[in-house]
Image (cartoon, grey):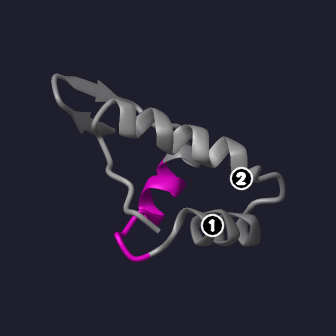
Amino acid sequence: MLLGPESVSVLNPTGAAILDLCDGQRTVAEIVGELREEYDHVVGDEVRNFLARLVAKRCVELGDD
């Protein structure tokens, strides 16, 4: 579950795995790479789109890397 401004989102296992890797140190490319090591069908664009939706909801912030 992810709490955001005036919202609650229930994440599927893939979404939870993406969010678990968001530690402020890894780049999006590194997150995609780590997910590809664990899961067979990780598509970078899907990860970026997922994170973009979380940014739009103000649940996460992306750095300038």
Taking the image as shown, residue 55 lies to the left or right of residue 44, namely left
Q: Secondary structure at mark 2?
A: helix
Task: Please report the residue visible at 69 percent of the width from the left and 70 percent of the height from the top.
Answer: 33
Write down the quadrant of residue 19 in the picture.
Answer: bottom left
Taking the image as shown, residue 59 lies to the left or right of residue 30, namely left
Q: Secondary structure at mark 1?
A: helix
Question: For mark 2, what is the residue?
Answer: 44
Discs 1, 2 touching: Cβ within 8 Å: yes
Earlier sequence position, callout 1 versus callout 2? 1
Residue type pointed to by label 1: Ala
Magenta residues? 16-25
Write down the quadrant of residue 2 in the picture.
Answer: top left
Local packing at callout 1 (Cα closer than 10 Å; few below 14, some 14-19, many 20+) is few
List the single residue furthest toward the left. Answer: 6
| Image position of 7 with respect to 50: above or below | above
Between 1 and 31, the one lying in front of the other is: 31
Label 1, label 2: how far apart the Cα atoms are: 8 Å
Question: For mark 1, what is the residue?
Answer: 29
Residue 20 lies in the magenta-colored region: yes
Q: Position of residue 38 (x, y in %)?
A: 71, 68
